[in-house]
Image (spheres, helix red, strand yellow):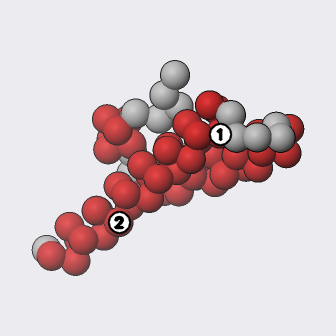
């Protein structure tokens, strides 16, 4: 039940990743408001956000080294 796979995040450009991250953060707030404890969905959303942040920082390092 992966919301975002690494291959999909790698294919996205910077702008698309930022848009997806905004969307996921909004979804995370909604899911946390509805649930008392962290559910599997909340955990998966957090992982997807972390995955996007990782790809963003990796691309910044690649661009800096060019």
Q: Residues within 10 Å of mark 2 (few under 14, many from 20)?
A: few
Asked which quadrant contains residue 10, the reply is top left
User: Does 57 sit above or below residue 43?
Assistant: below
| Residue that appears at 50% across and 43% down | 48
Percent position (x, y) of residue 24?
Answer: 63, 46
In the picture of the structure, the residue carrying the numbered disc 1 is 42
Identify the residue shown where x is 24% and y is 71%: 61
Which secondary structure lies at badge 2?
helix
Relative to 40, is 58 above or below?
Answer: below
**Residue 46 visible from this viewpoint:** yes
Q: Residue furthest front?
A: 37
Residue at 31% across, 35% down: 7
- Where is residue 37 shown, x and y percent of the image? 76, 40
Question: What is the x, y in percent for residue 40?
Answer: 62, 31
Residue extending farthest bottom: 64
Which residue is label 2 attached to? 57
Q: Using the image as rendered, state which of residue 16 and residue 23 is in the foreground.
A: 23
Q: Earlier in the sequence, mark 1 or mark 2?
A: 1
Q: Position of residue 46 (x, y in %)?
A: 56, 47
Which residue is depicted at the point 52% across and 22% down?
1
Residue 9 relative to residue 23: left or right: left
What kind of element bears circle 1?
helix
**Disc 1 packing (10 Å; few <14; some 14–19; many ≥20):** some
Per the rendering, the mark at residue 64 is none
Please say if 45 is above or below 66. Answer: above
State the residue lying farthest toward the top: 1
Residue 55 shown left or right of residue 53 in the figure: left
């Amino acid at each position: 039940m992966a919301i975002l796979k690494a291959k999909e995040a790698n294919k996205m450009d910077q702008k698309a990743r930022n848009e997806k991250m905004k969307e996921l953060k909004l979804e995370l707030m909604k899911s946390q408001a509805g649930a008392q404890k962290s559910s599997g969905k909340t955990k998966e959303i957090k992982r997807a956000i972390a995955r996007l942040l990782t790809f963003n920082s990796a691309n910044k390092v690649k661009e800096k080294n060019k």
